[in-house]
Amino acid sequence: MGRKKAKRINLALQGGGAHGAFTWGVLDRLLEHEEVEIAAISGTSAGALNGAALKSGLVRNGRAGAKEALDGLWEEMGAVSDVRLDAWLSQFGPTTEMVTRMLQASVPFAFLDSIATFTSPYVYGAFYENPLSDVVEALNCPDIASKKGPALFISTTNVRTGKIRVFSGAEVTTDVILASACLPELFQAVEIEDPVTGVTDPYWDGGYTGNPALFPLFEPEFPQDVVIVNINPLERPGTPKTPEEIQNRINEISFNSSMLRELRAIQFVRNLIAEKRLPAGSMKDVLIHMIADDDLMQDLSARTKLVPSPLLLSRMKEAGRAACDRFLEAHFDDLGKRASVDLKAMFA
């Protein structure tokens, strides 16, 4: 009996700093499921880093290469010497919620946080160096820009125009990936020249305008299914009252807003198709799926996004693997047939 034909999907990978280790776990588990084939990837910030590692590894050595590249990325991000050891130790360490509260109560961290808020990254002058440069260089950009493997789209924000700019194919360079993850409070804007106009513009984190951008995945050559790996909780119970809670929720809402607008537009088109108010085949009927763990993310905060500790990264990875397992068990059969996210209920 022949092997089943793989189901083709698109991946949409959100940004969220160290919380992107959750996506690492999702991708690590997804790569083990050979009945799923990745056709295209749209990534922003940490999602761009994950997407770049995923593609470069796939081009270099298939699924094993992709797992190796993702492991290497997050080892660099958190100086994780042995993920298996950290995973074992994490069973005996403080809970994720306790880690978050310790960071929130940490006087040194609060001091550094306030310095970042009131100090420009431009004060370093000629001594400035983007701390992610070595990490991104190690991803091997020639493989990332290759025509082989899944299509890759990286979202950035043009500082001059305030508009989203999505880079793909040969446009994807080290600078583009750095721009996608450029939080303006921490990093100097990344300047990129437009090869057509010759204009050089500064770019910031793509999360402000597309986290991640979904529209590049609507092209006819890509499958209907878009699987969003969501690391910013859509809902958070209660009213934020402390400065920390307020700032944290503002961060989450801001970095979800562009994606929610696109999801609303997708549902609008789906309604038109269902009501036969559009000519057959004129618009793509996109099937949305989501892999998330809002309970875990609600135990975290904007501060934990900036602290890639081995303990936290290990827990995030394992949570991502578990969330992917739950998704595959519940919704693998939905792929190619129906959406598993009820957008109508989401926007009711």
Image (cartoon, helix red, strand yellow):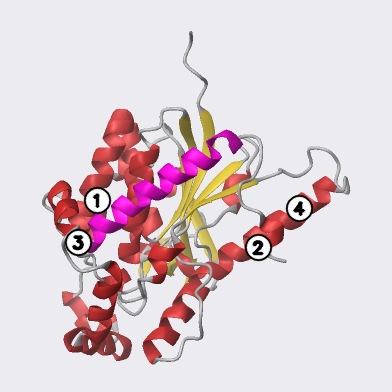
Q: Is residue 323 magenta?
A: yes
Whole-Å distance between the Cαs marked 3 and 2? Answer: 34 Å
Circle 3: element type? helix
- Residue at horizontal 16 percent and vertical 76 percent from the top: 127
Q: Which callout, 1 or 2, points to the residue nearer the camera? A: 2
Whole-Å distance between the Cαs marked 3 and 1? Answer: 16 Å
In the displayed structure, 308 sits above or below 320; it is below
Side of 270 where 324 appears, left or right: left
In the displayed structure, 32 sits above or below 325; it is above
Given the image, on which type of amino acid does mark 3 rest? Leu
Whole-Å distance between the Cαs marked 4 and 3? Answer: 43 Å
Disc on res. 311? 3
Circle 4: element type? helix
Q: Residue furthest front?
A: 92
- Residue at horizontal 47 percent and vertical 73 percent from the top: 252
Disc 1 target residue: 73
Side of 142 where 216 appears, left or right: right
Circle 1: element type? helix
Magenta residue span = 310-335
Residue placed most toward the observer, 346 or 136: 346
Whole-Å distance between the Cαs marked 1 and 4? Answer: 38 Å
The answer to which of marks 4 and 3 sits earlier in the sequence is: 4
Given the image, on which type of amino acid does mark 4 rest? Val
The answer to which of marks 1 and 2 sits earlier in the sequence is: 1
Q: Which callout, 2 or 4, points to the residue nearer the camera? A: 2
Given the image, on which type of amino acid does mark 2 rest? Met
Image quadrant for the C terminus? bottom right
Residue placed most toward the observer, 191 or 261: 261
Disc 4 target residue: 269
The answer to which of marks 1 and 4 sits earlier in the sequence is: 1
Disc 2 target residue: 346
